Image (spheres, grey):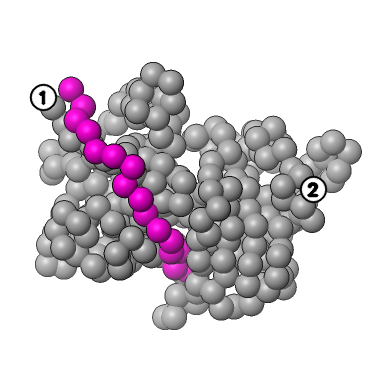
Amino acid sequence: MSTPFRKIHGAGNDFVLLNGTDQDTGCDWRDTAVRLCARRTGIGADGLVVSTLISTDPPVLEISCINADGSIATMCGNALRCSAWAAAGDFGFDTMTLVMAGVKHEATVTGRAVAVTAEVGAVDMRVVESVWGGRPFWFDSAHTGTEHVVAVVNDVDGIDAEACGRLMRHHPKLAPLGANVNFVESVDQQTLKIRTYERGVEAETLSCGSGAVAAVVIAGRRGLVTAGPVAVRNRAGTPLIVTPHADRPARSYWVSGPVTLAYEGVLS
């Protein structure tokens, strides 16, 4: 059976997006994700996303995100944003609820601009120290639906994010789950620069929505950014904007930015 798909990205974080059915809920997509996301032999993507419409009044969609290595993502801000954009085009929704790994996220769509919420859990400062190239790094942790560690550095472009990120992702103090690894530079009180090594992709990605939120949370704790909107400049050159939620600013943030459809196709 032929299956339509979209190749879509949120600020450079790219996905293969499928529209699921009620029968697909609970399916094991891991082998499919590994096959489709392979950069040289498949479509190529950071992850596979399956979006299933659960309700139209109110609009609710179940979103499953499987990383390129076949592991399950409990939170992926850009996958949620891409799913919301597709649902807006398919069903005419401009606001909706997206459920990923049992957690509800709000979403709003205005043209190509899409914002979703990320919930913030435990935040711990100076959880692990690492030395790379003779330079010490202290990493703070912030749970933004998934595990993140953040190191504030003077020059993010001078970091070997791929090698250092891989080392930290497997650090014994972060076992057994490991973590997404972020290197963040403070530009000014409303701007950060970031590079992210993503667990599950096992590589540096061009952007990471939950990582952008983690960066703002940690930078806020360190007094580096204001409480208002913060632009998080990523490797894609397409900043994500992180803003505290008006109703629950201490534990929920909006992450917003553009979504781009690369192409559509059919799996056969």
Tag 2 near tag 1, CB within 8 Å: no
Q: Which residues are magenta?
A: 253-268
Is residue 32 left or right of 24 when viewed as pictured? right
Q: Main secondary structure of the magenta part?
A: strand
In percent of width and height, residue 18 lies at 24, 39
Is residue 245 left or right of 262 when viewed as pictured? right
In percent of width and height, residue 256 lies at 43, 64
Q: Label 1, secondary structure: give it.
A: loop
Residue at 70 percent across and 70 percent down: it is 188
Picture layout, residue 18 above or below residue 150: above
In percent of width and height, residue 82 lies at 33, 52
Position of the C terminus, as image quadrant, is: top left
Q: Is residue 32 magenta?
A: no
Residue picked out by circle 1: 1
In percent of width and height, residue 263 lies at 29, 39
Q: Is residue 211 visible?
A: no
Position of the N terminus, as image quadrant, is: top left
The residue nearer to you, when weighing 64 against 266, is 266
Pointer 2: residues within 10 angstroms few (<14), some, or many (20+)?
some
Residue at 45 percent across and 75 percent down: it is 245
Image quadrant assignment for residue 58: bottom left
Pointer 1: residues within 10 angstroms few (<14), some, or many (20+)?
few
Is residue 75 left or right of 152 when viewed as pictured? left
Q: Is residue 164 visible?
A: yes
Residue type at tag 2:
Phe
Residue picked out by circle 2: 137
Q: How many marks?
A: 2
Real-space Cα separation, disc 2 to disc 1, in angstroms: 51 Å
Residue type at tag 1:
Met
Residue 178 got which mark?
none
Q: Label 2, secondary structure: give it.
A: strand
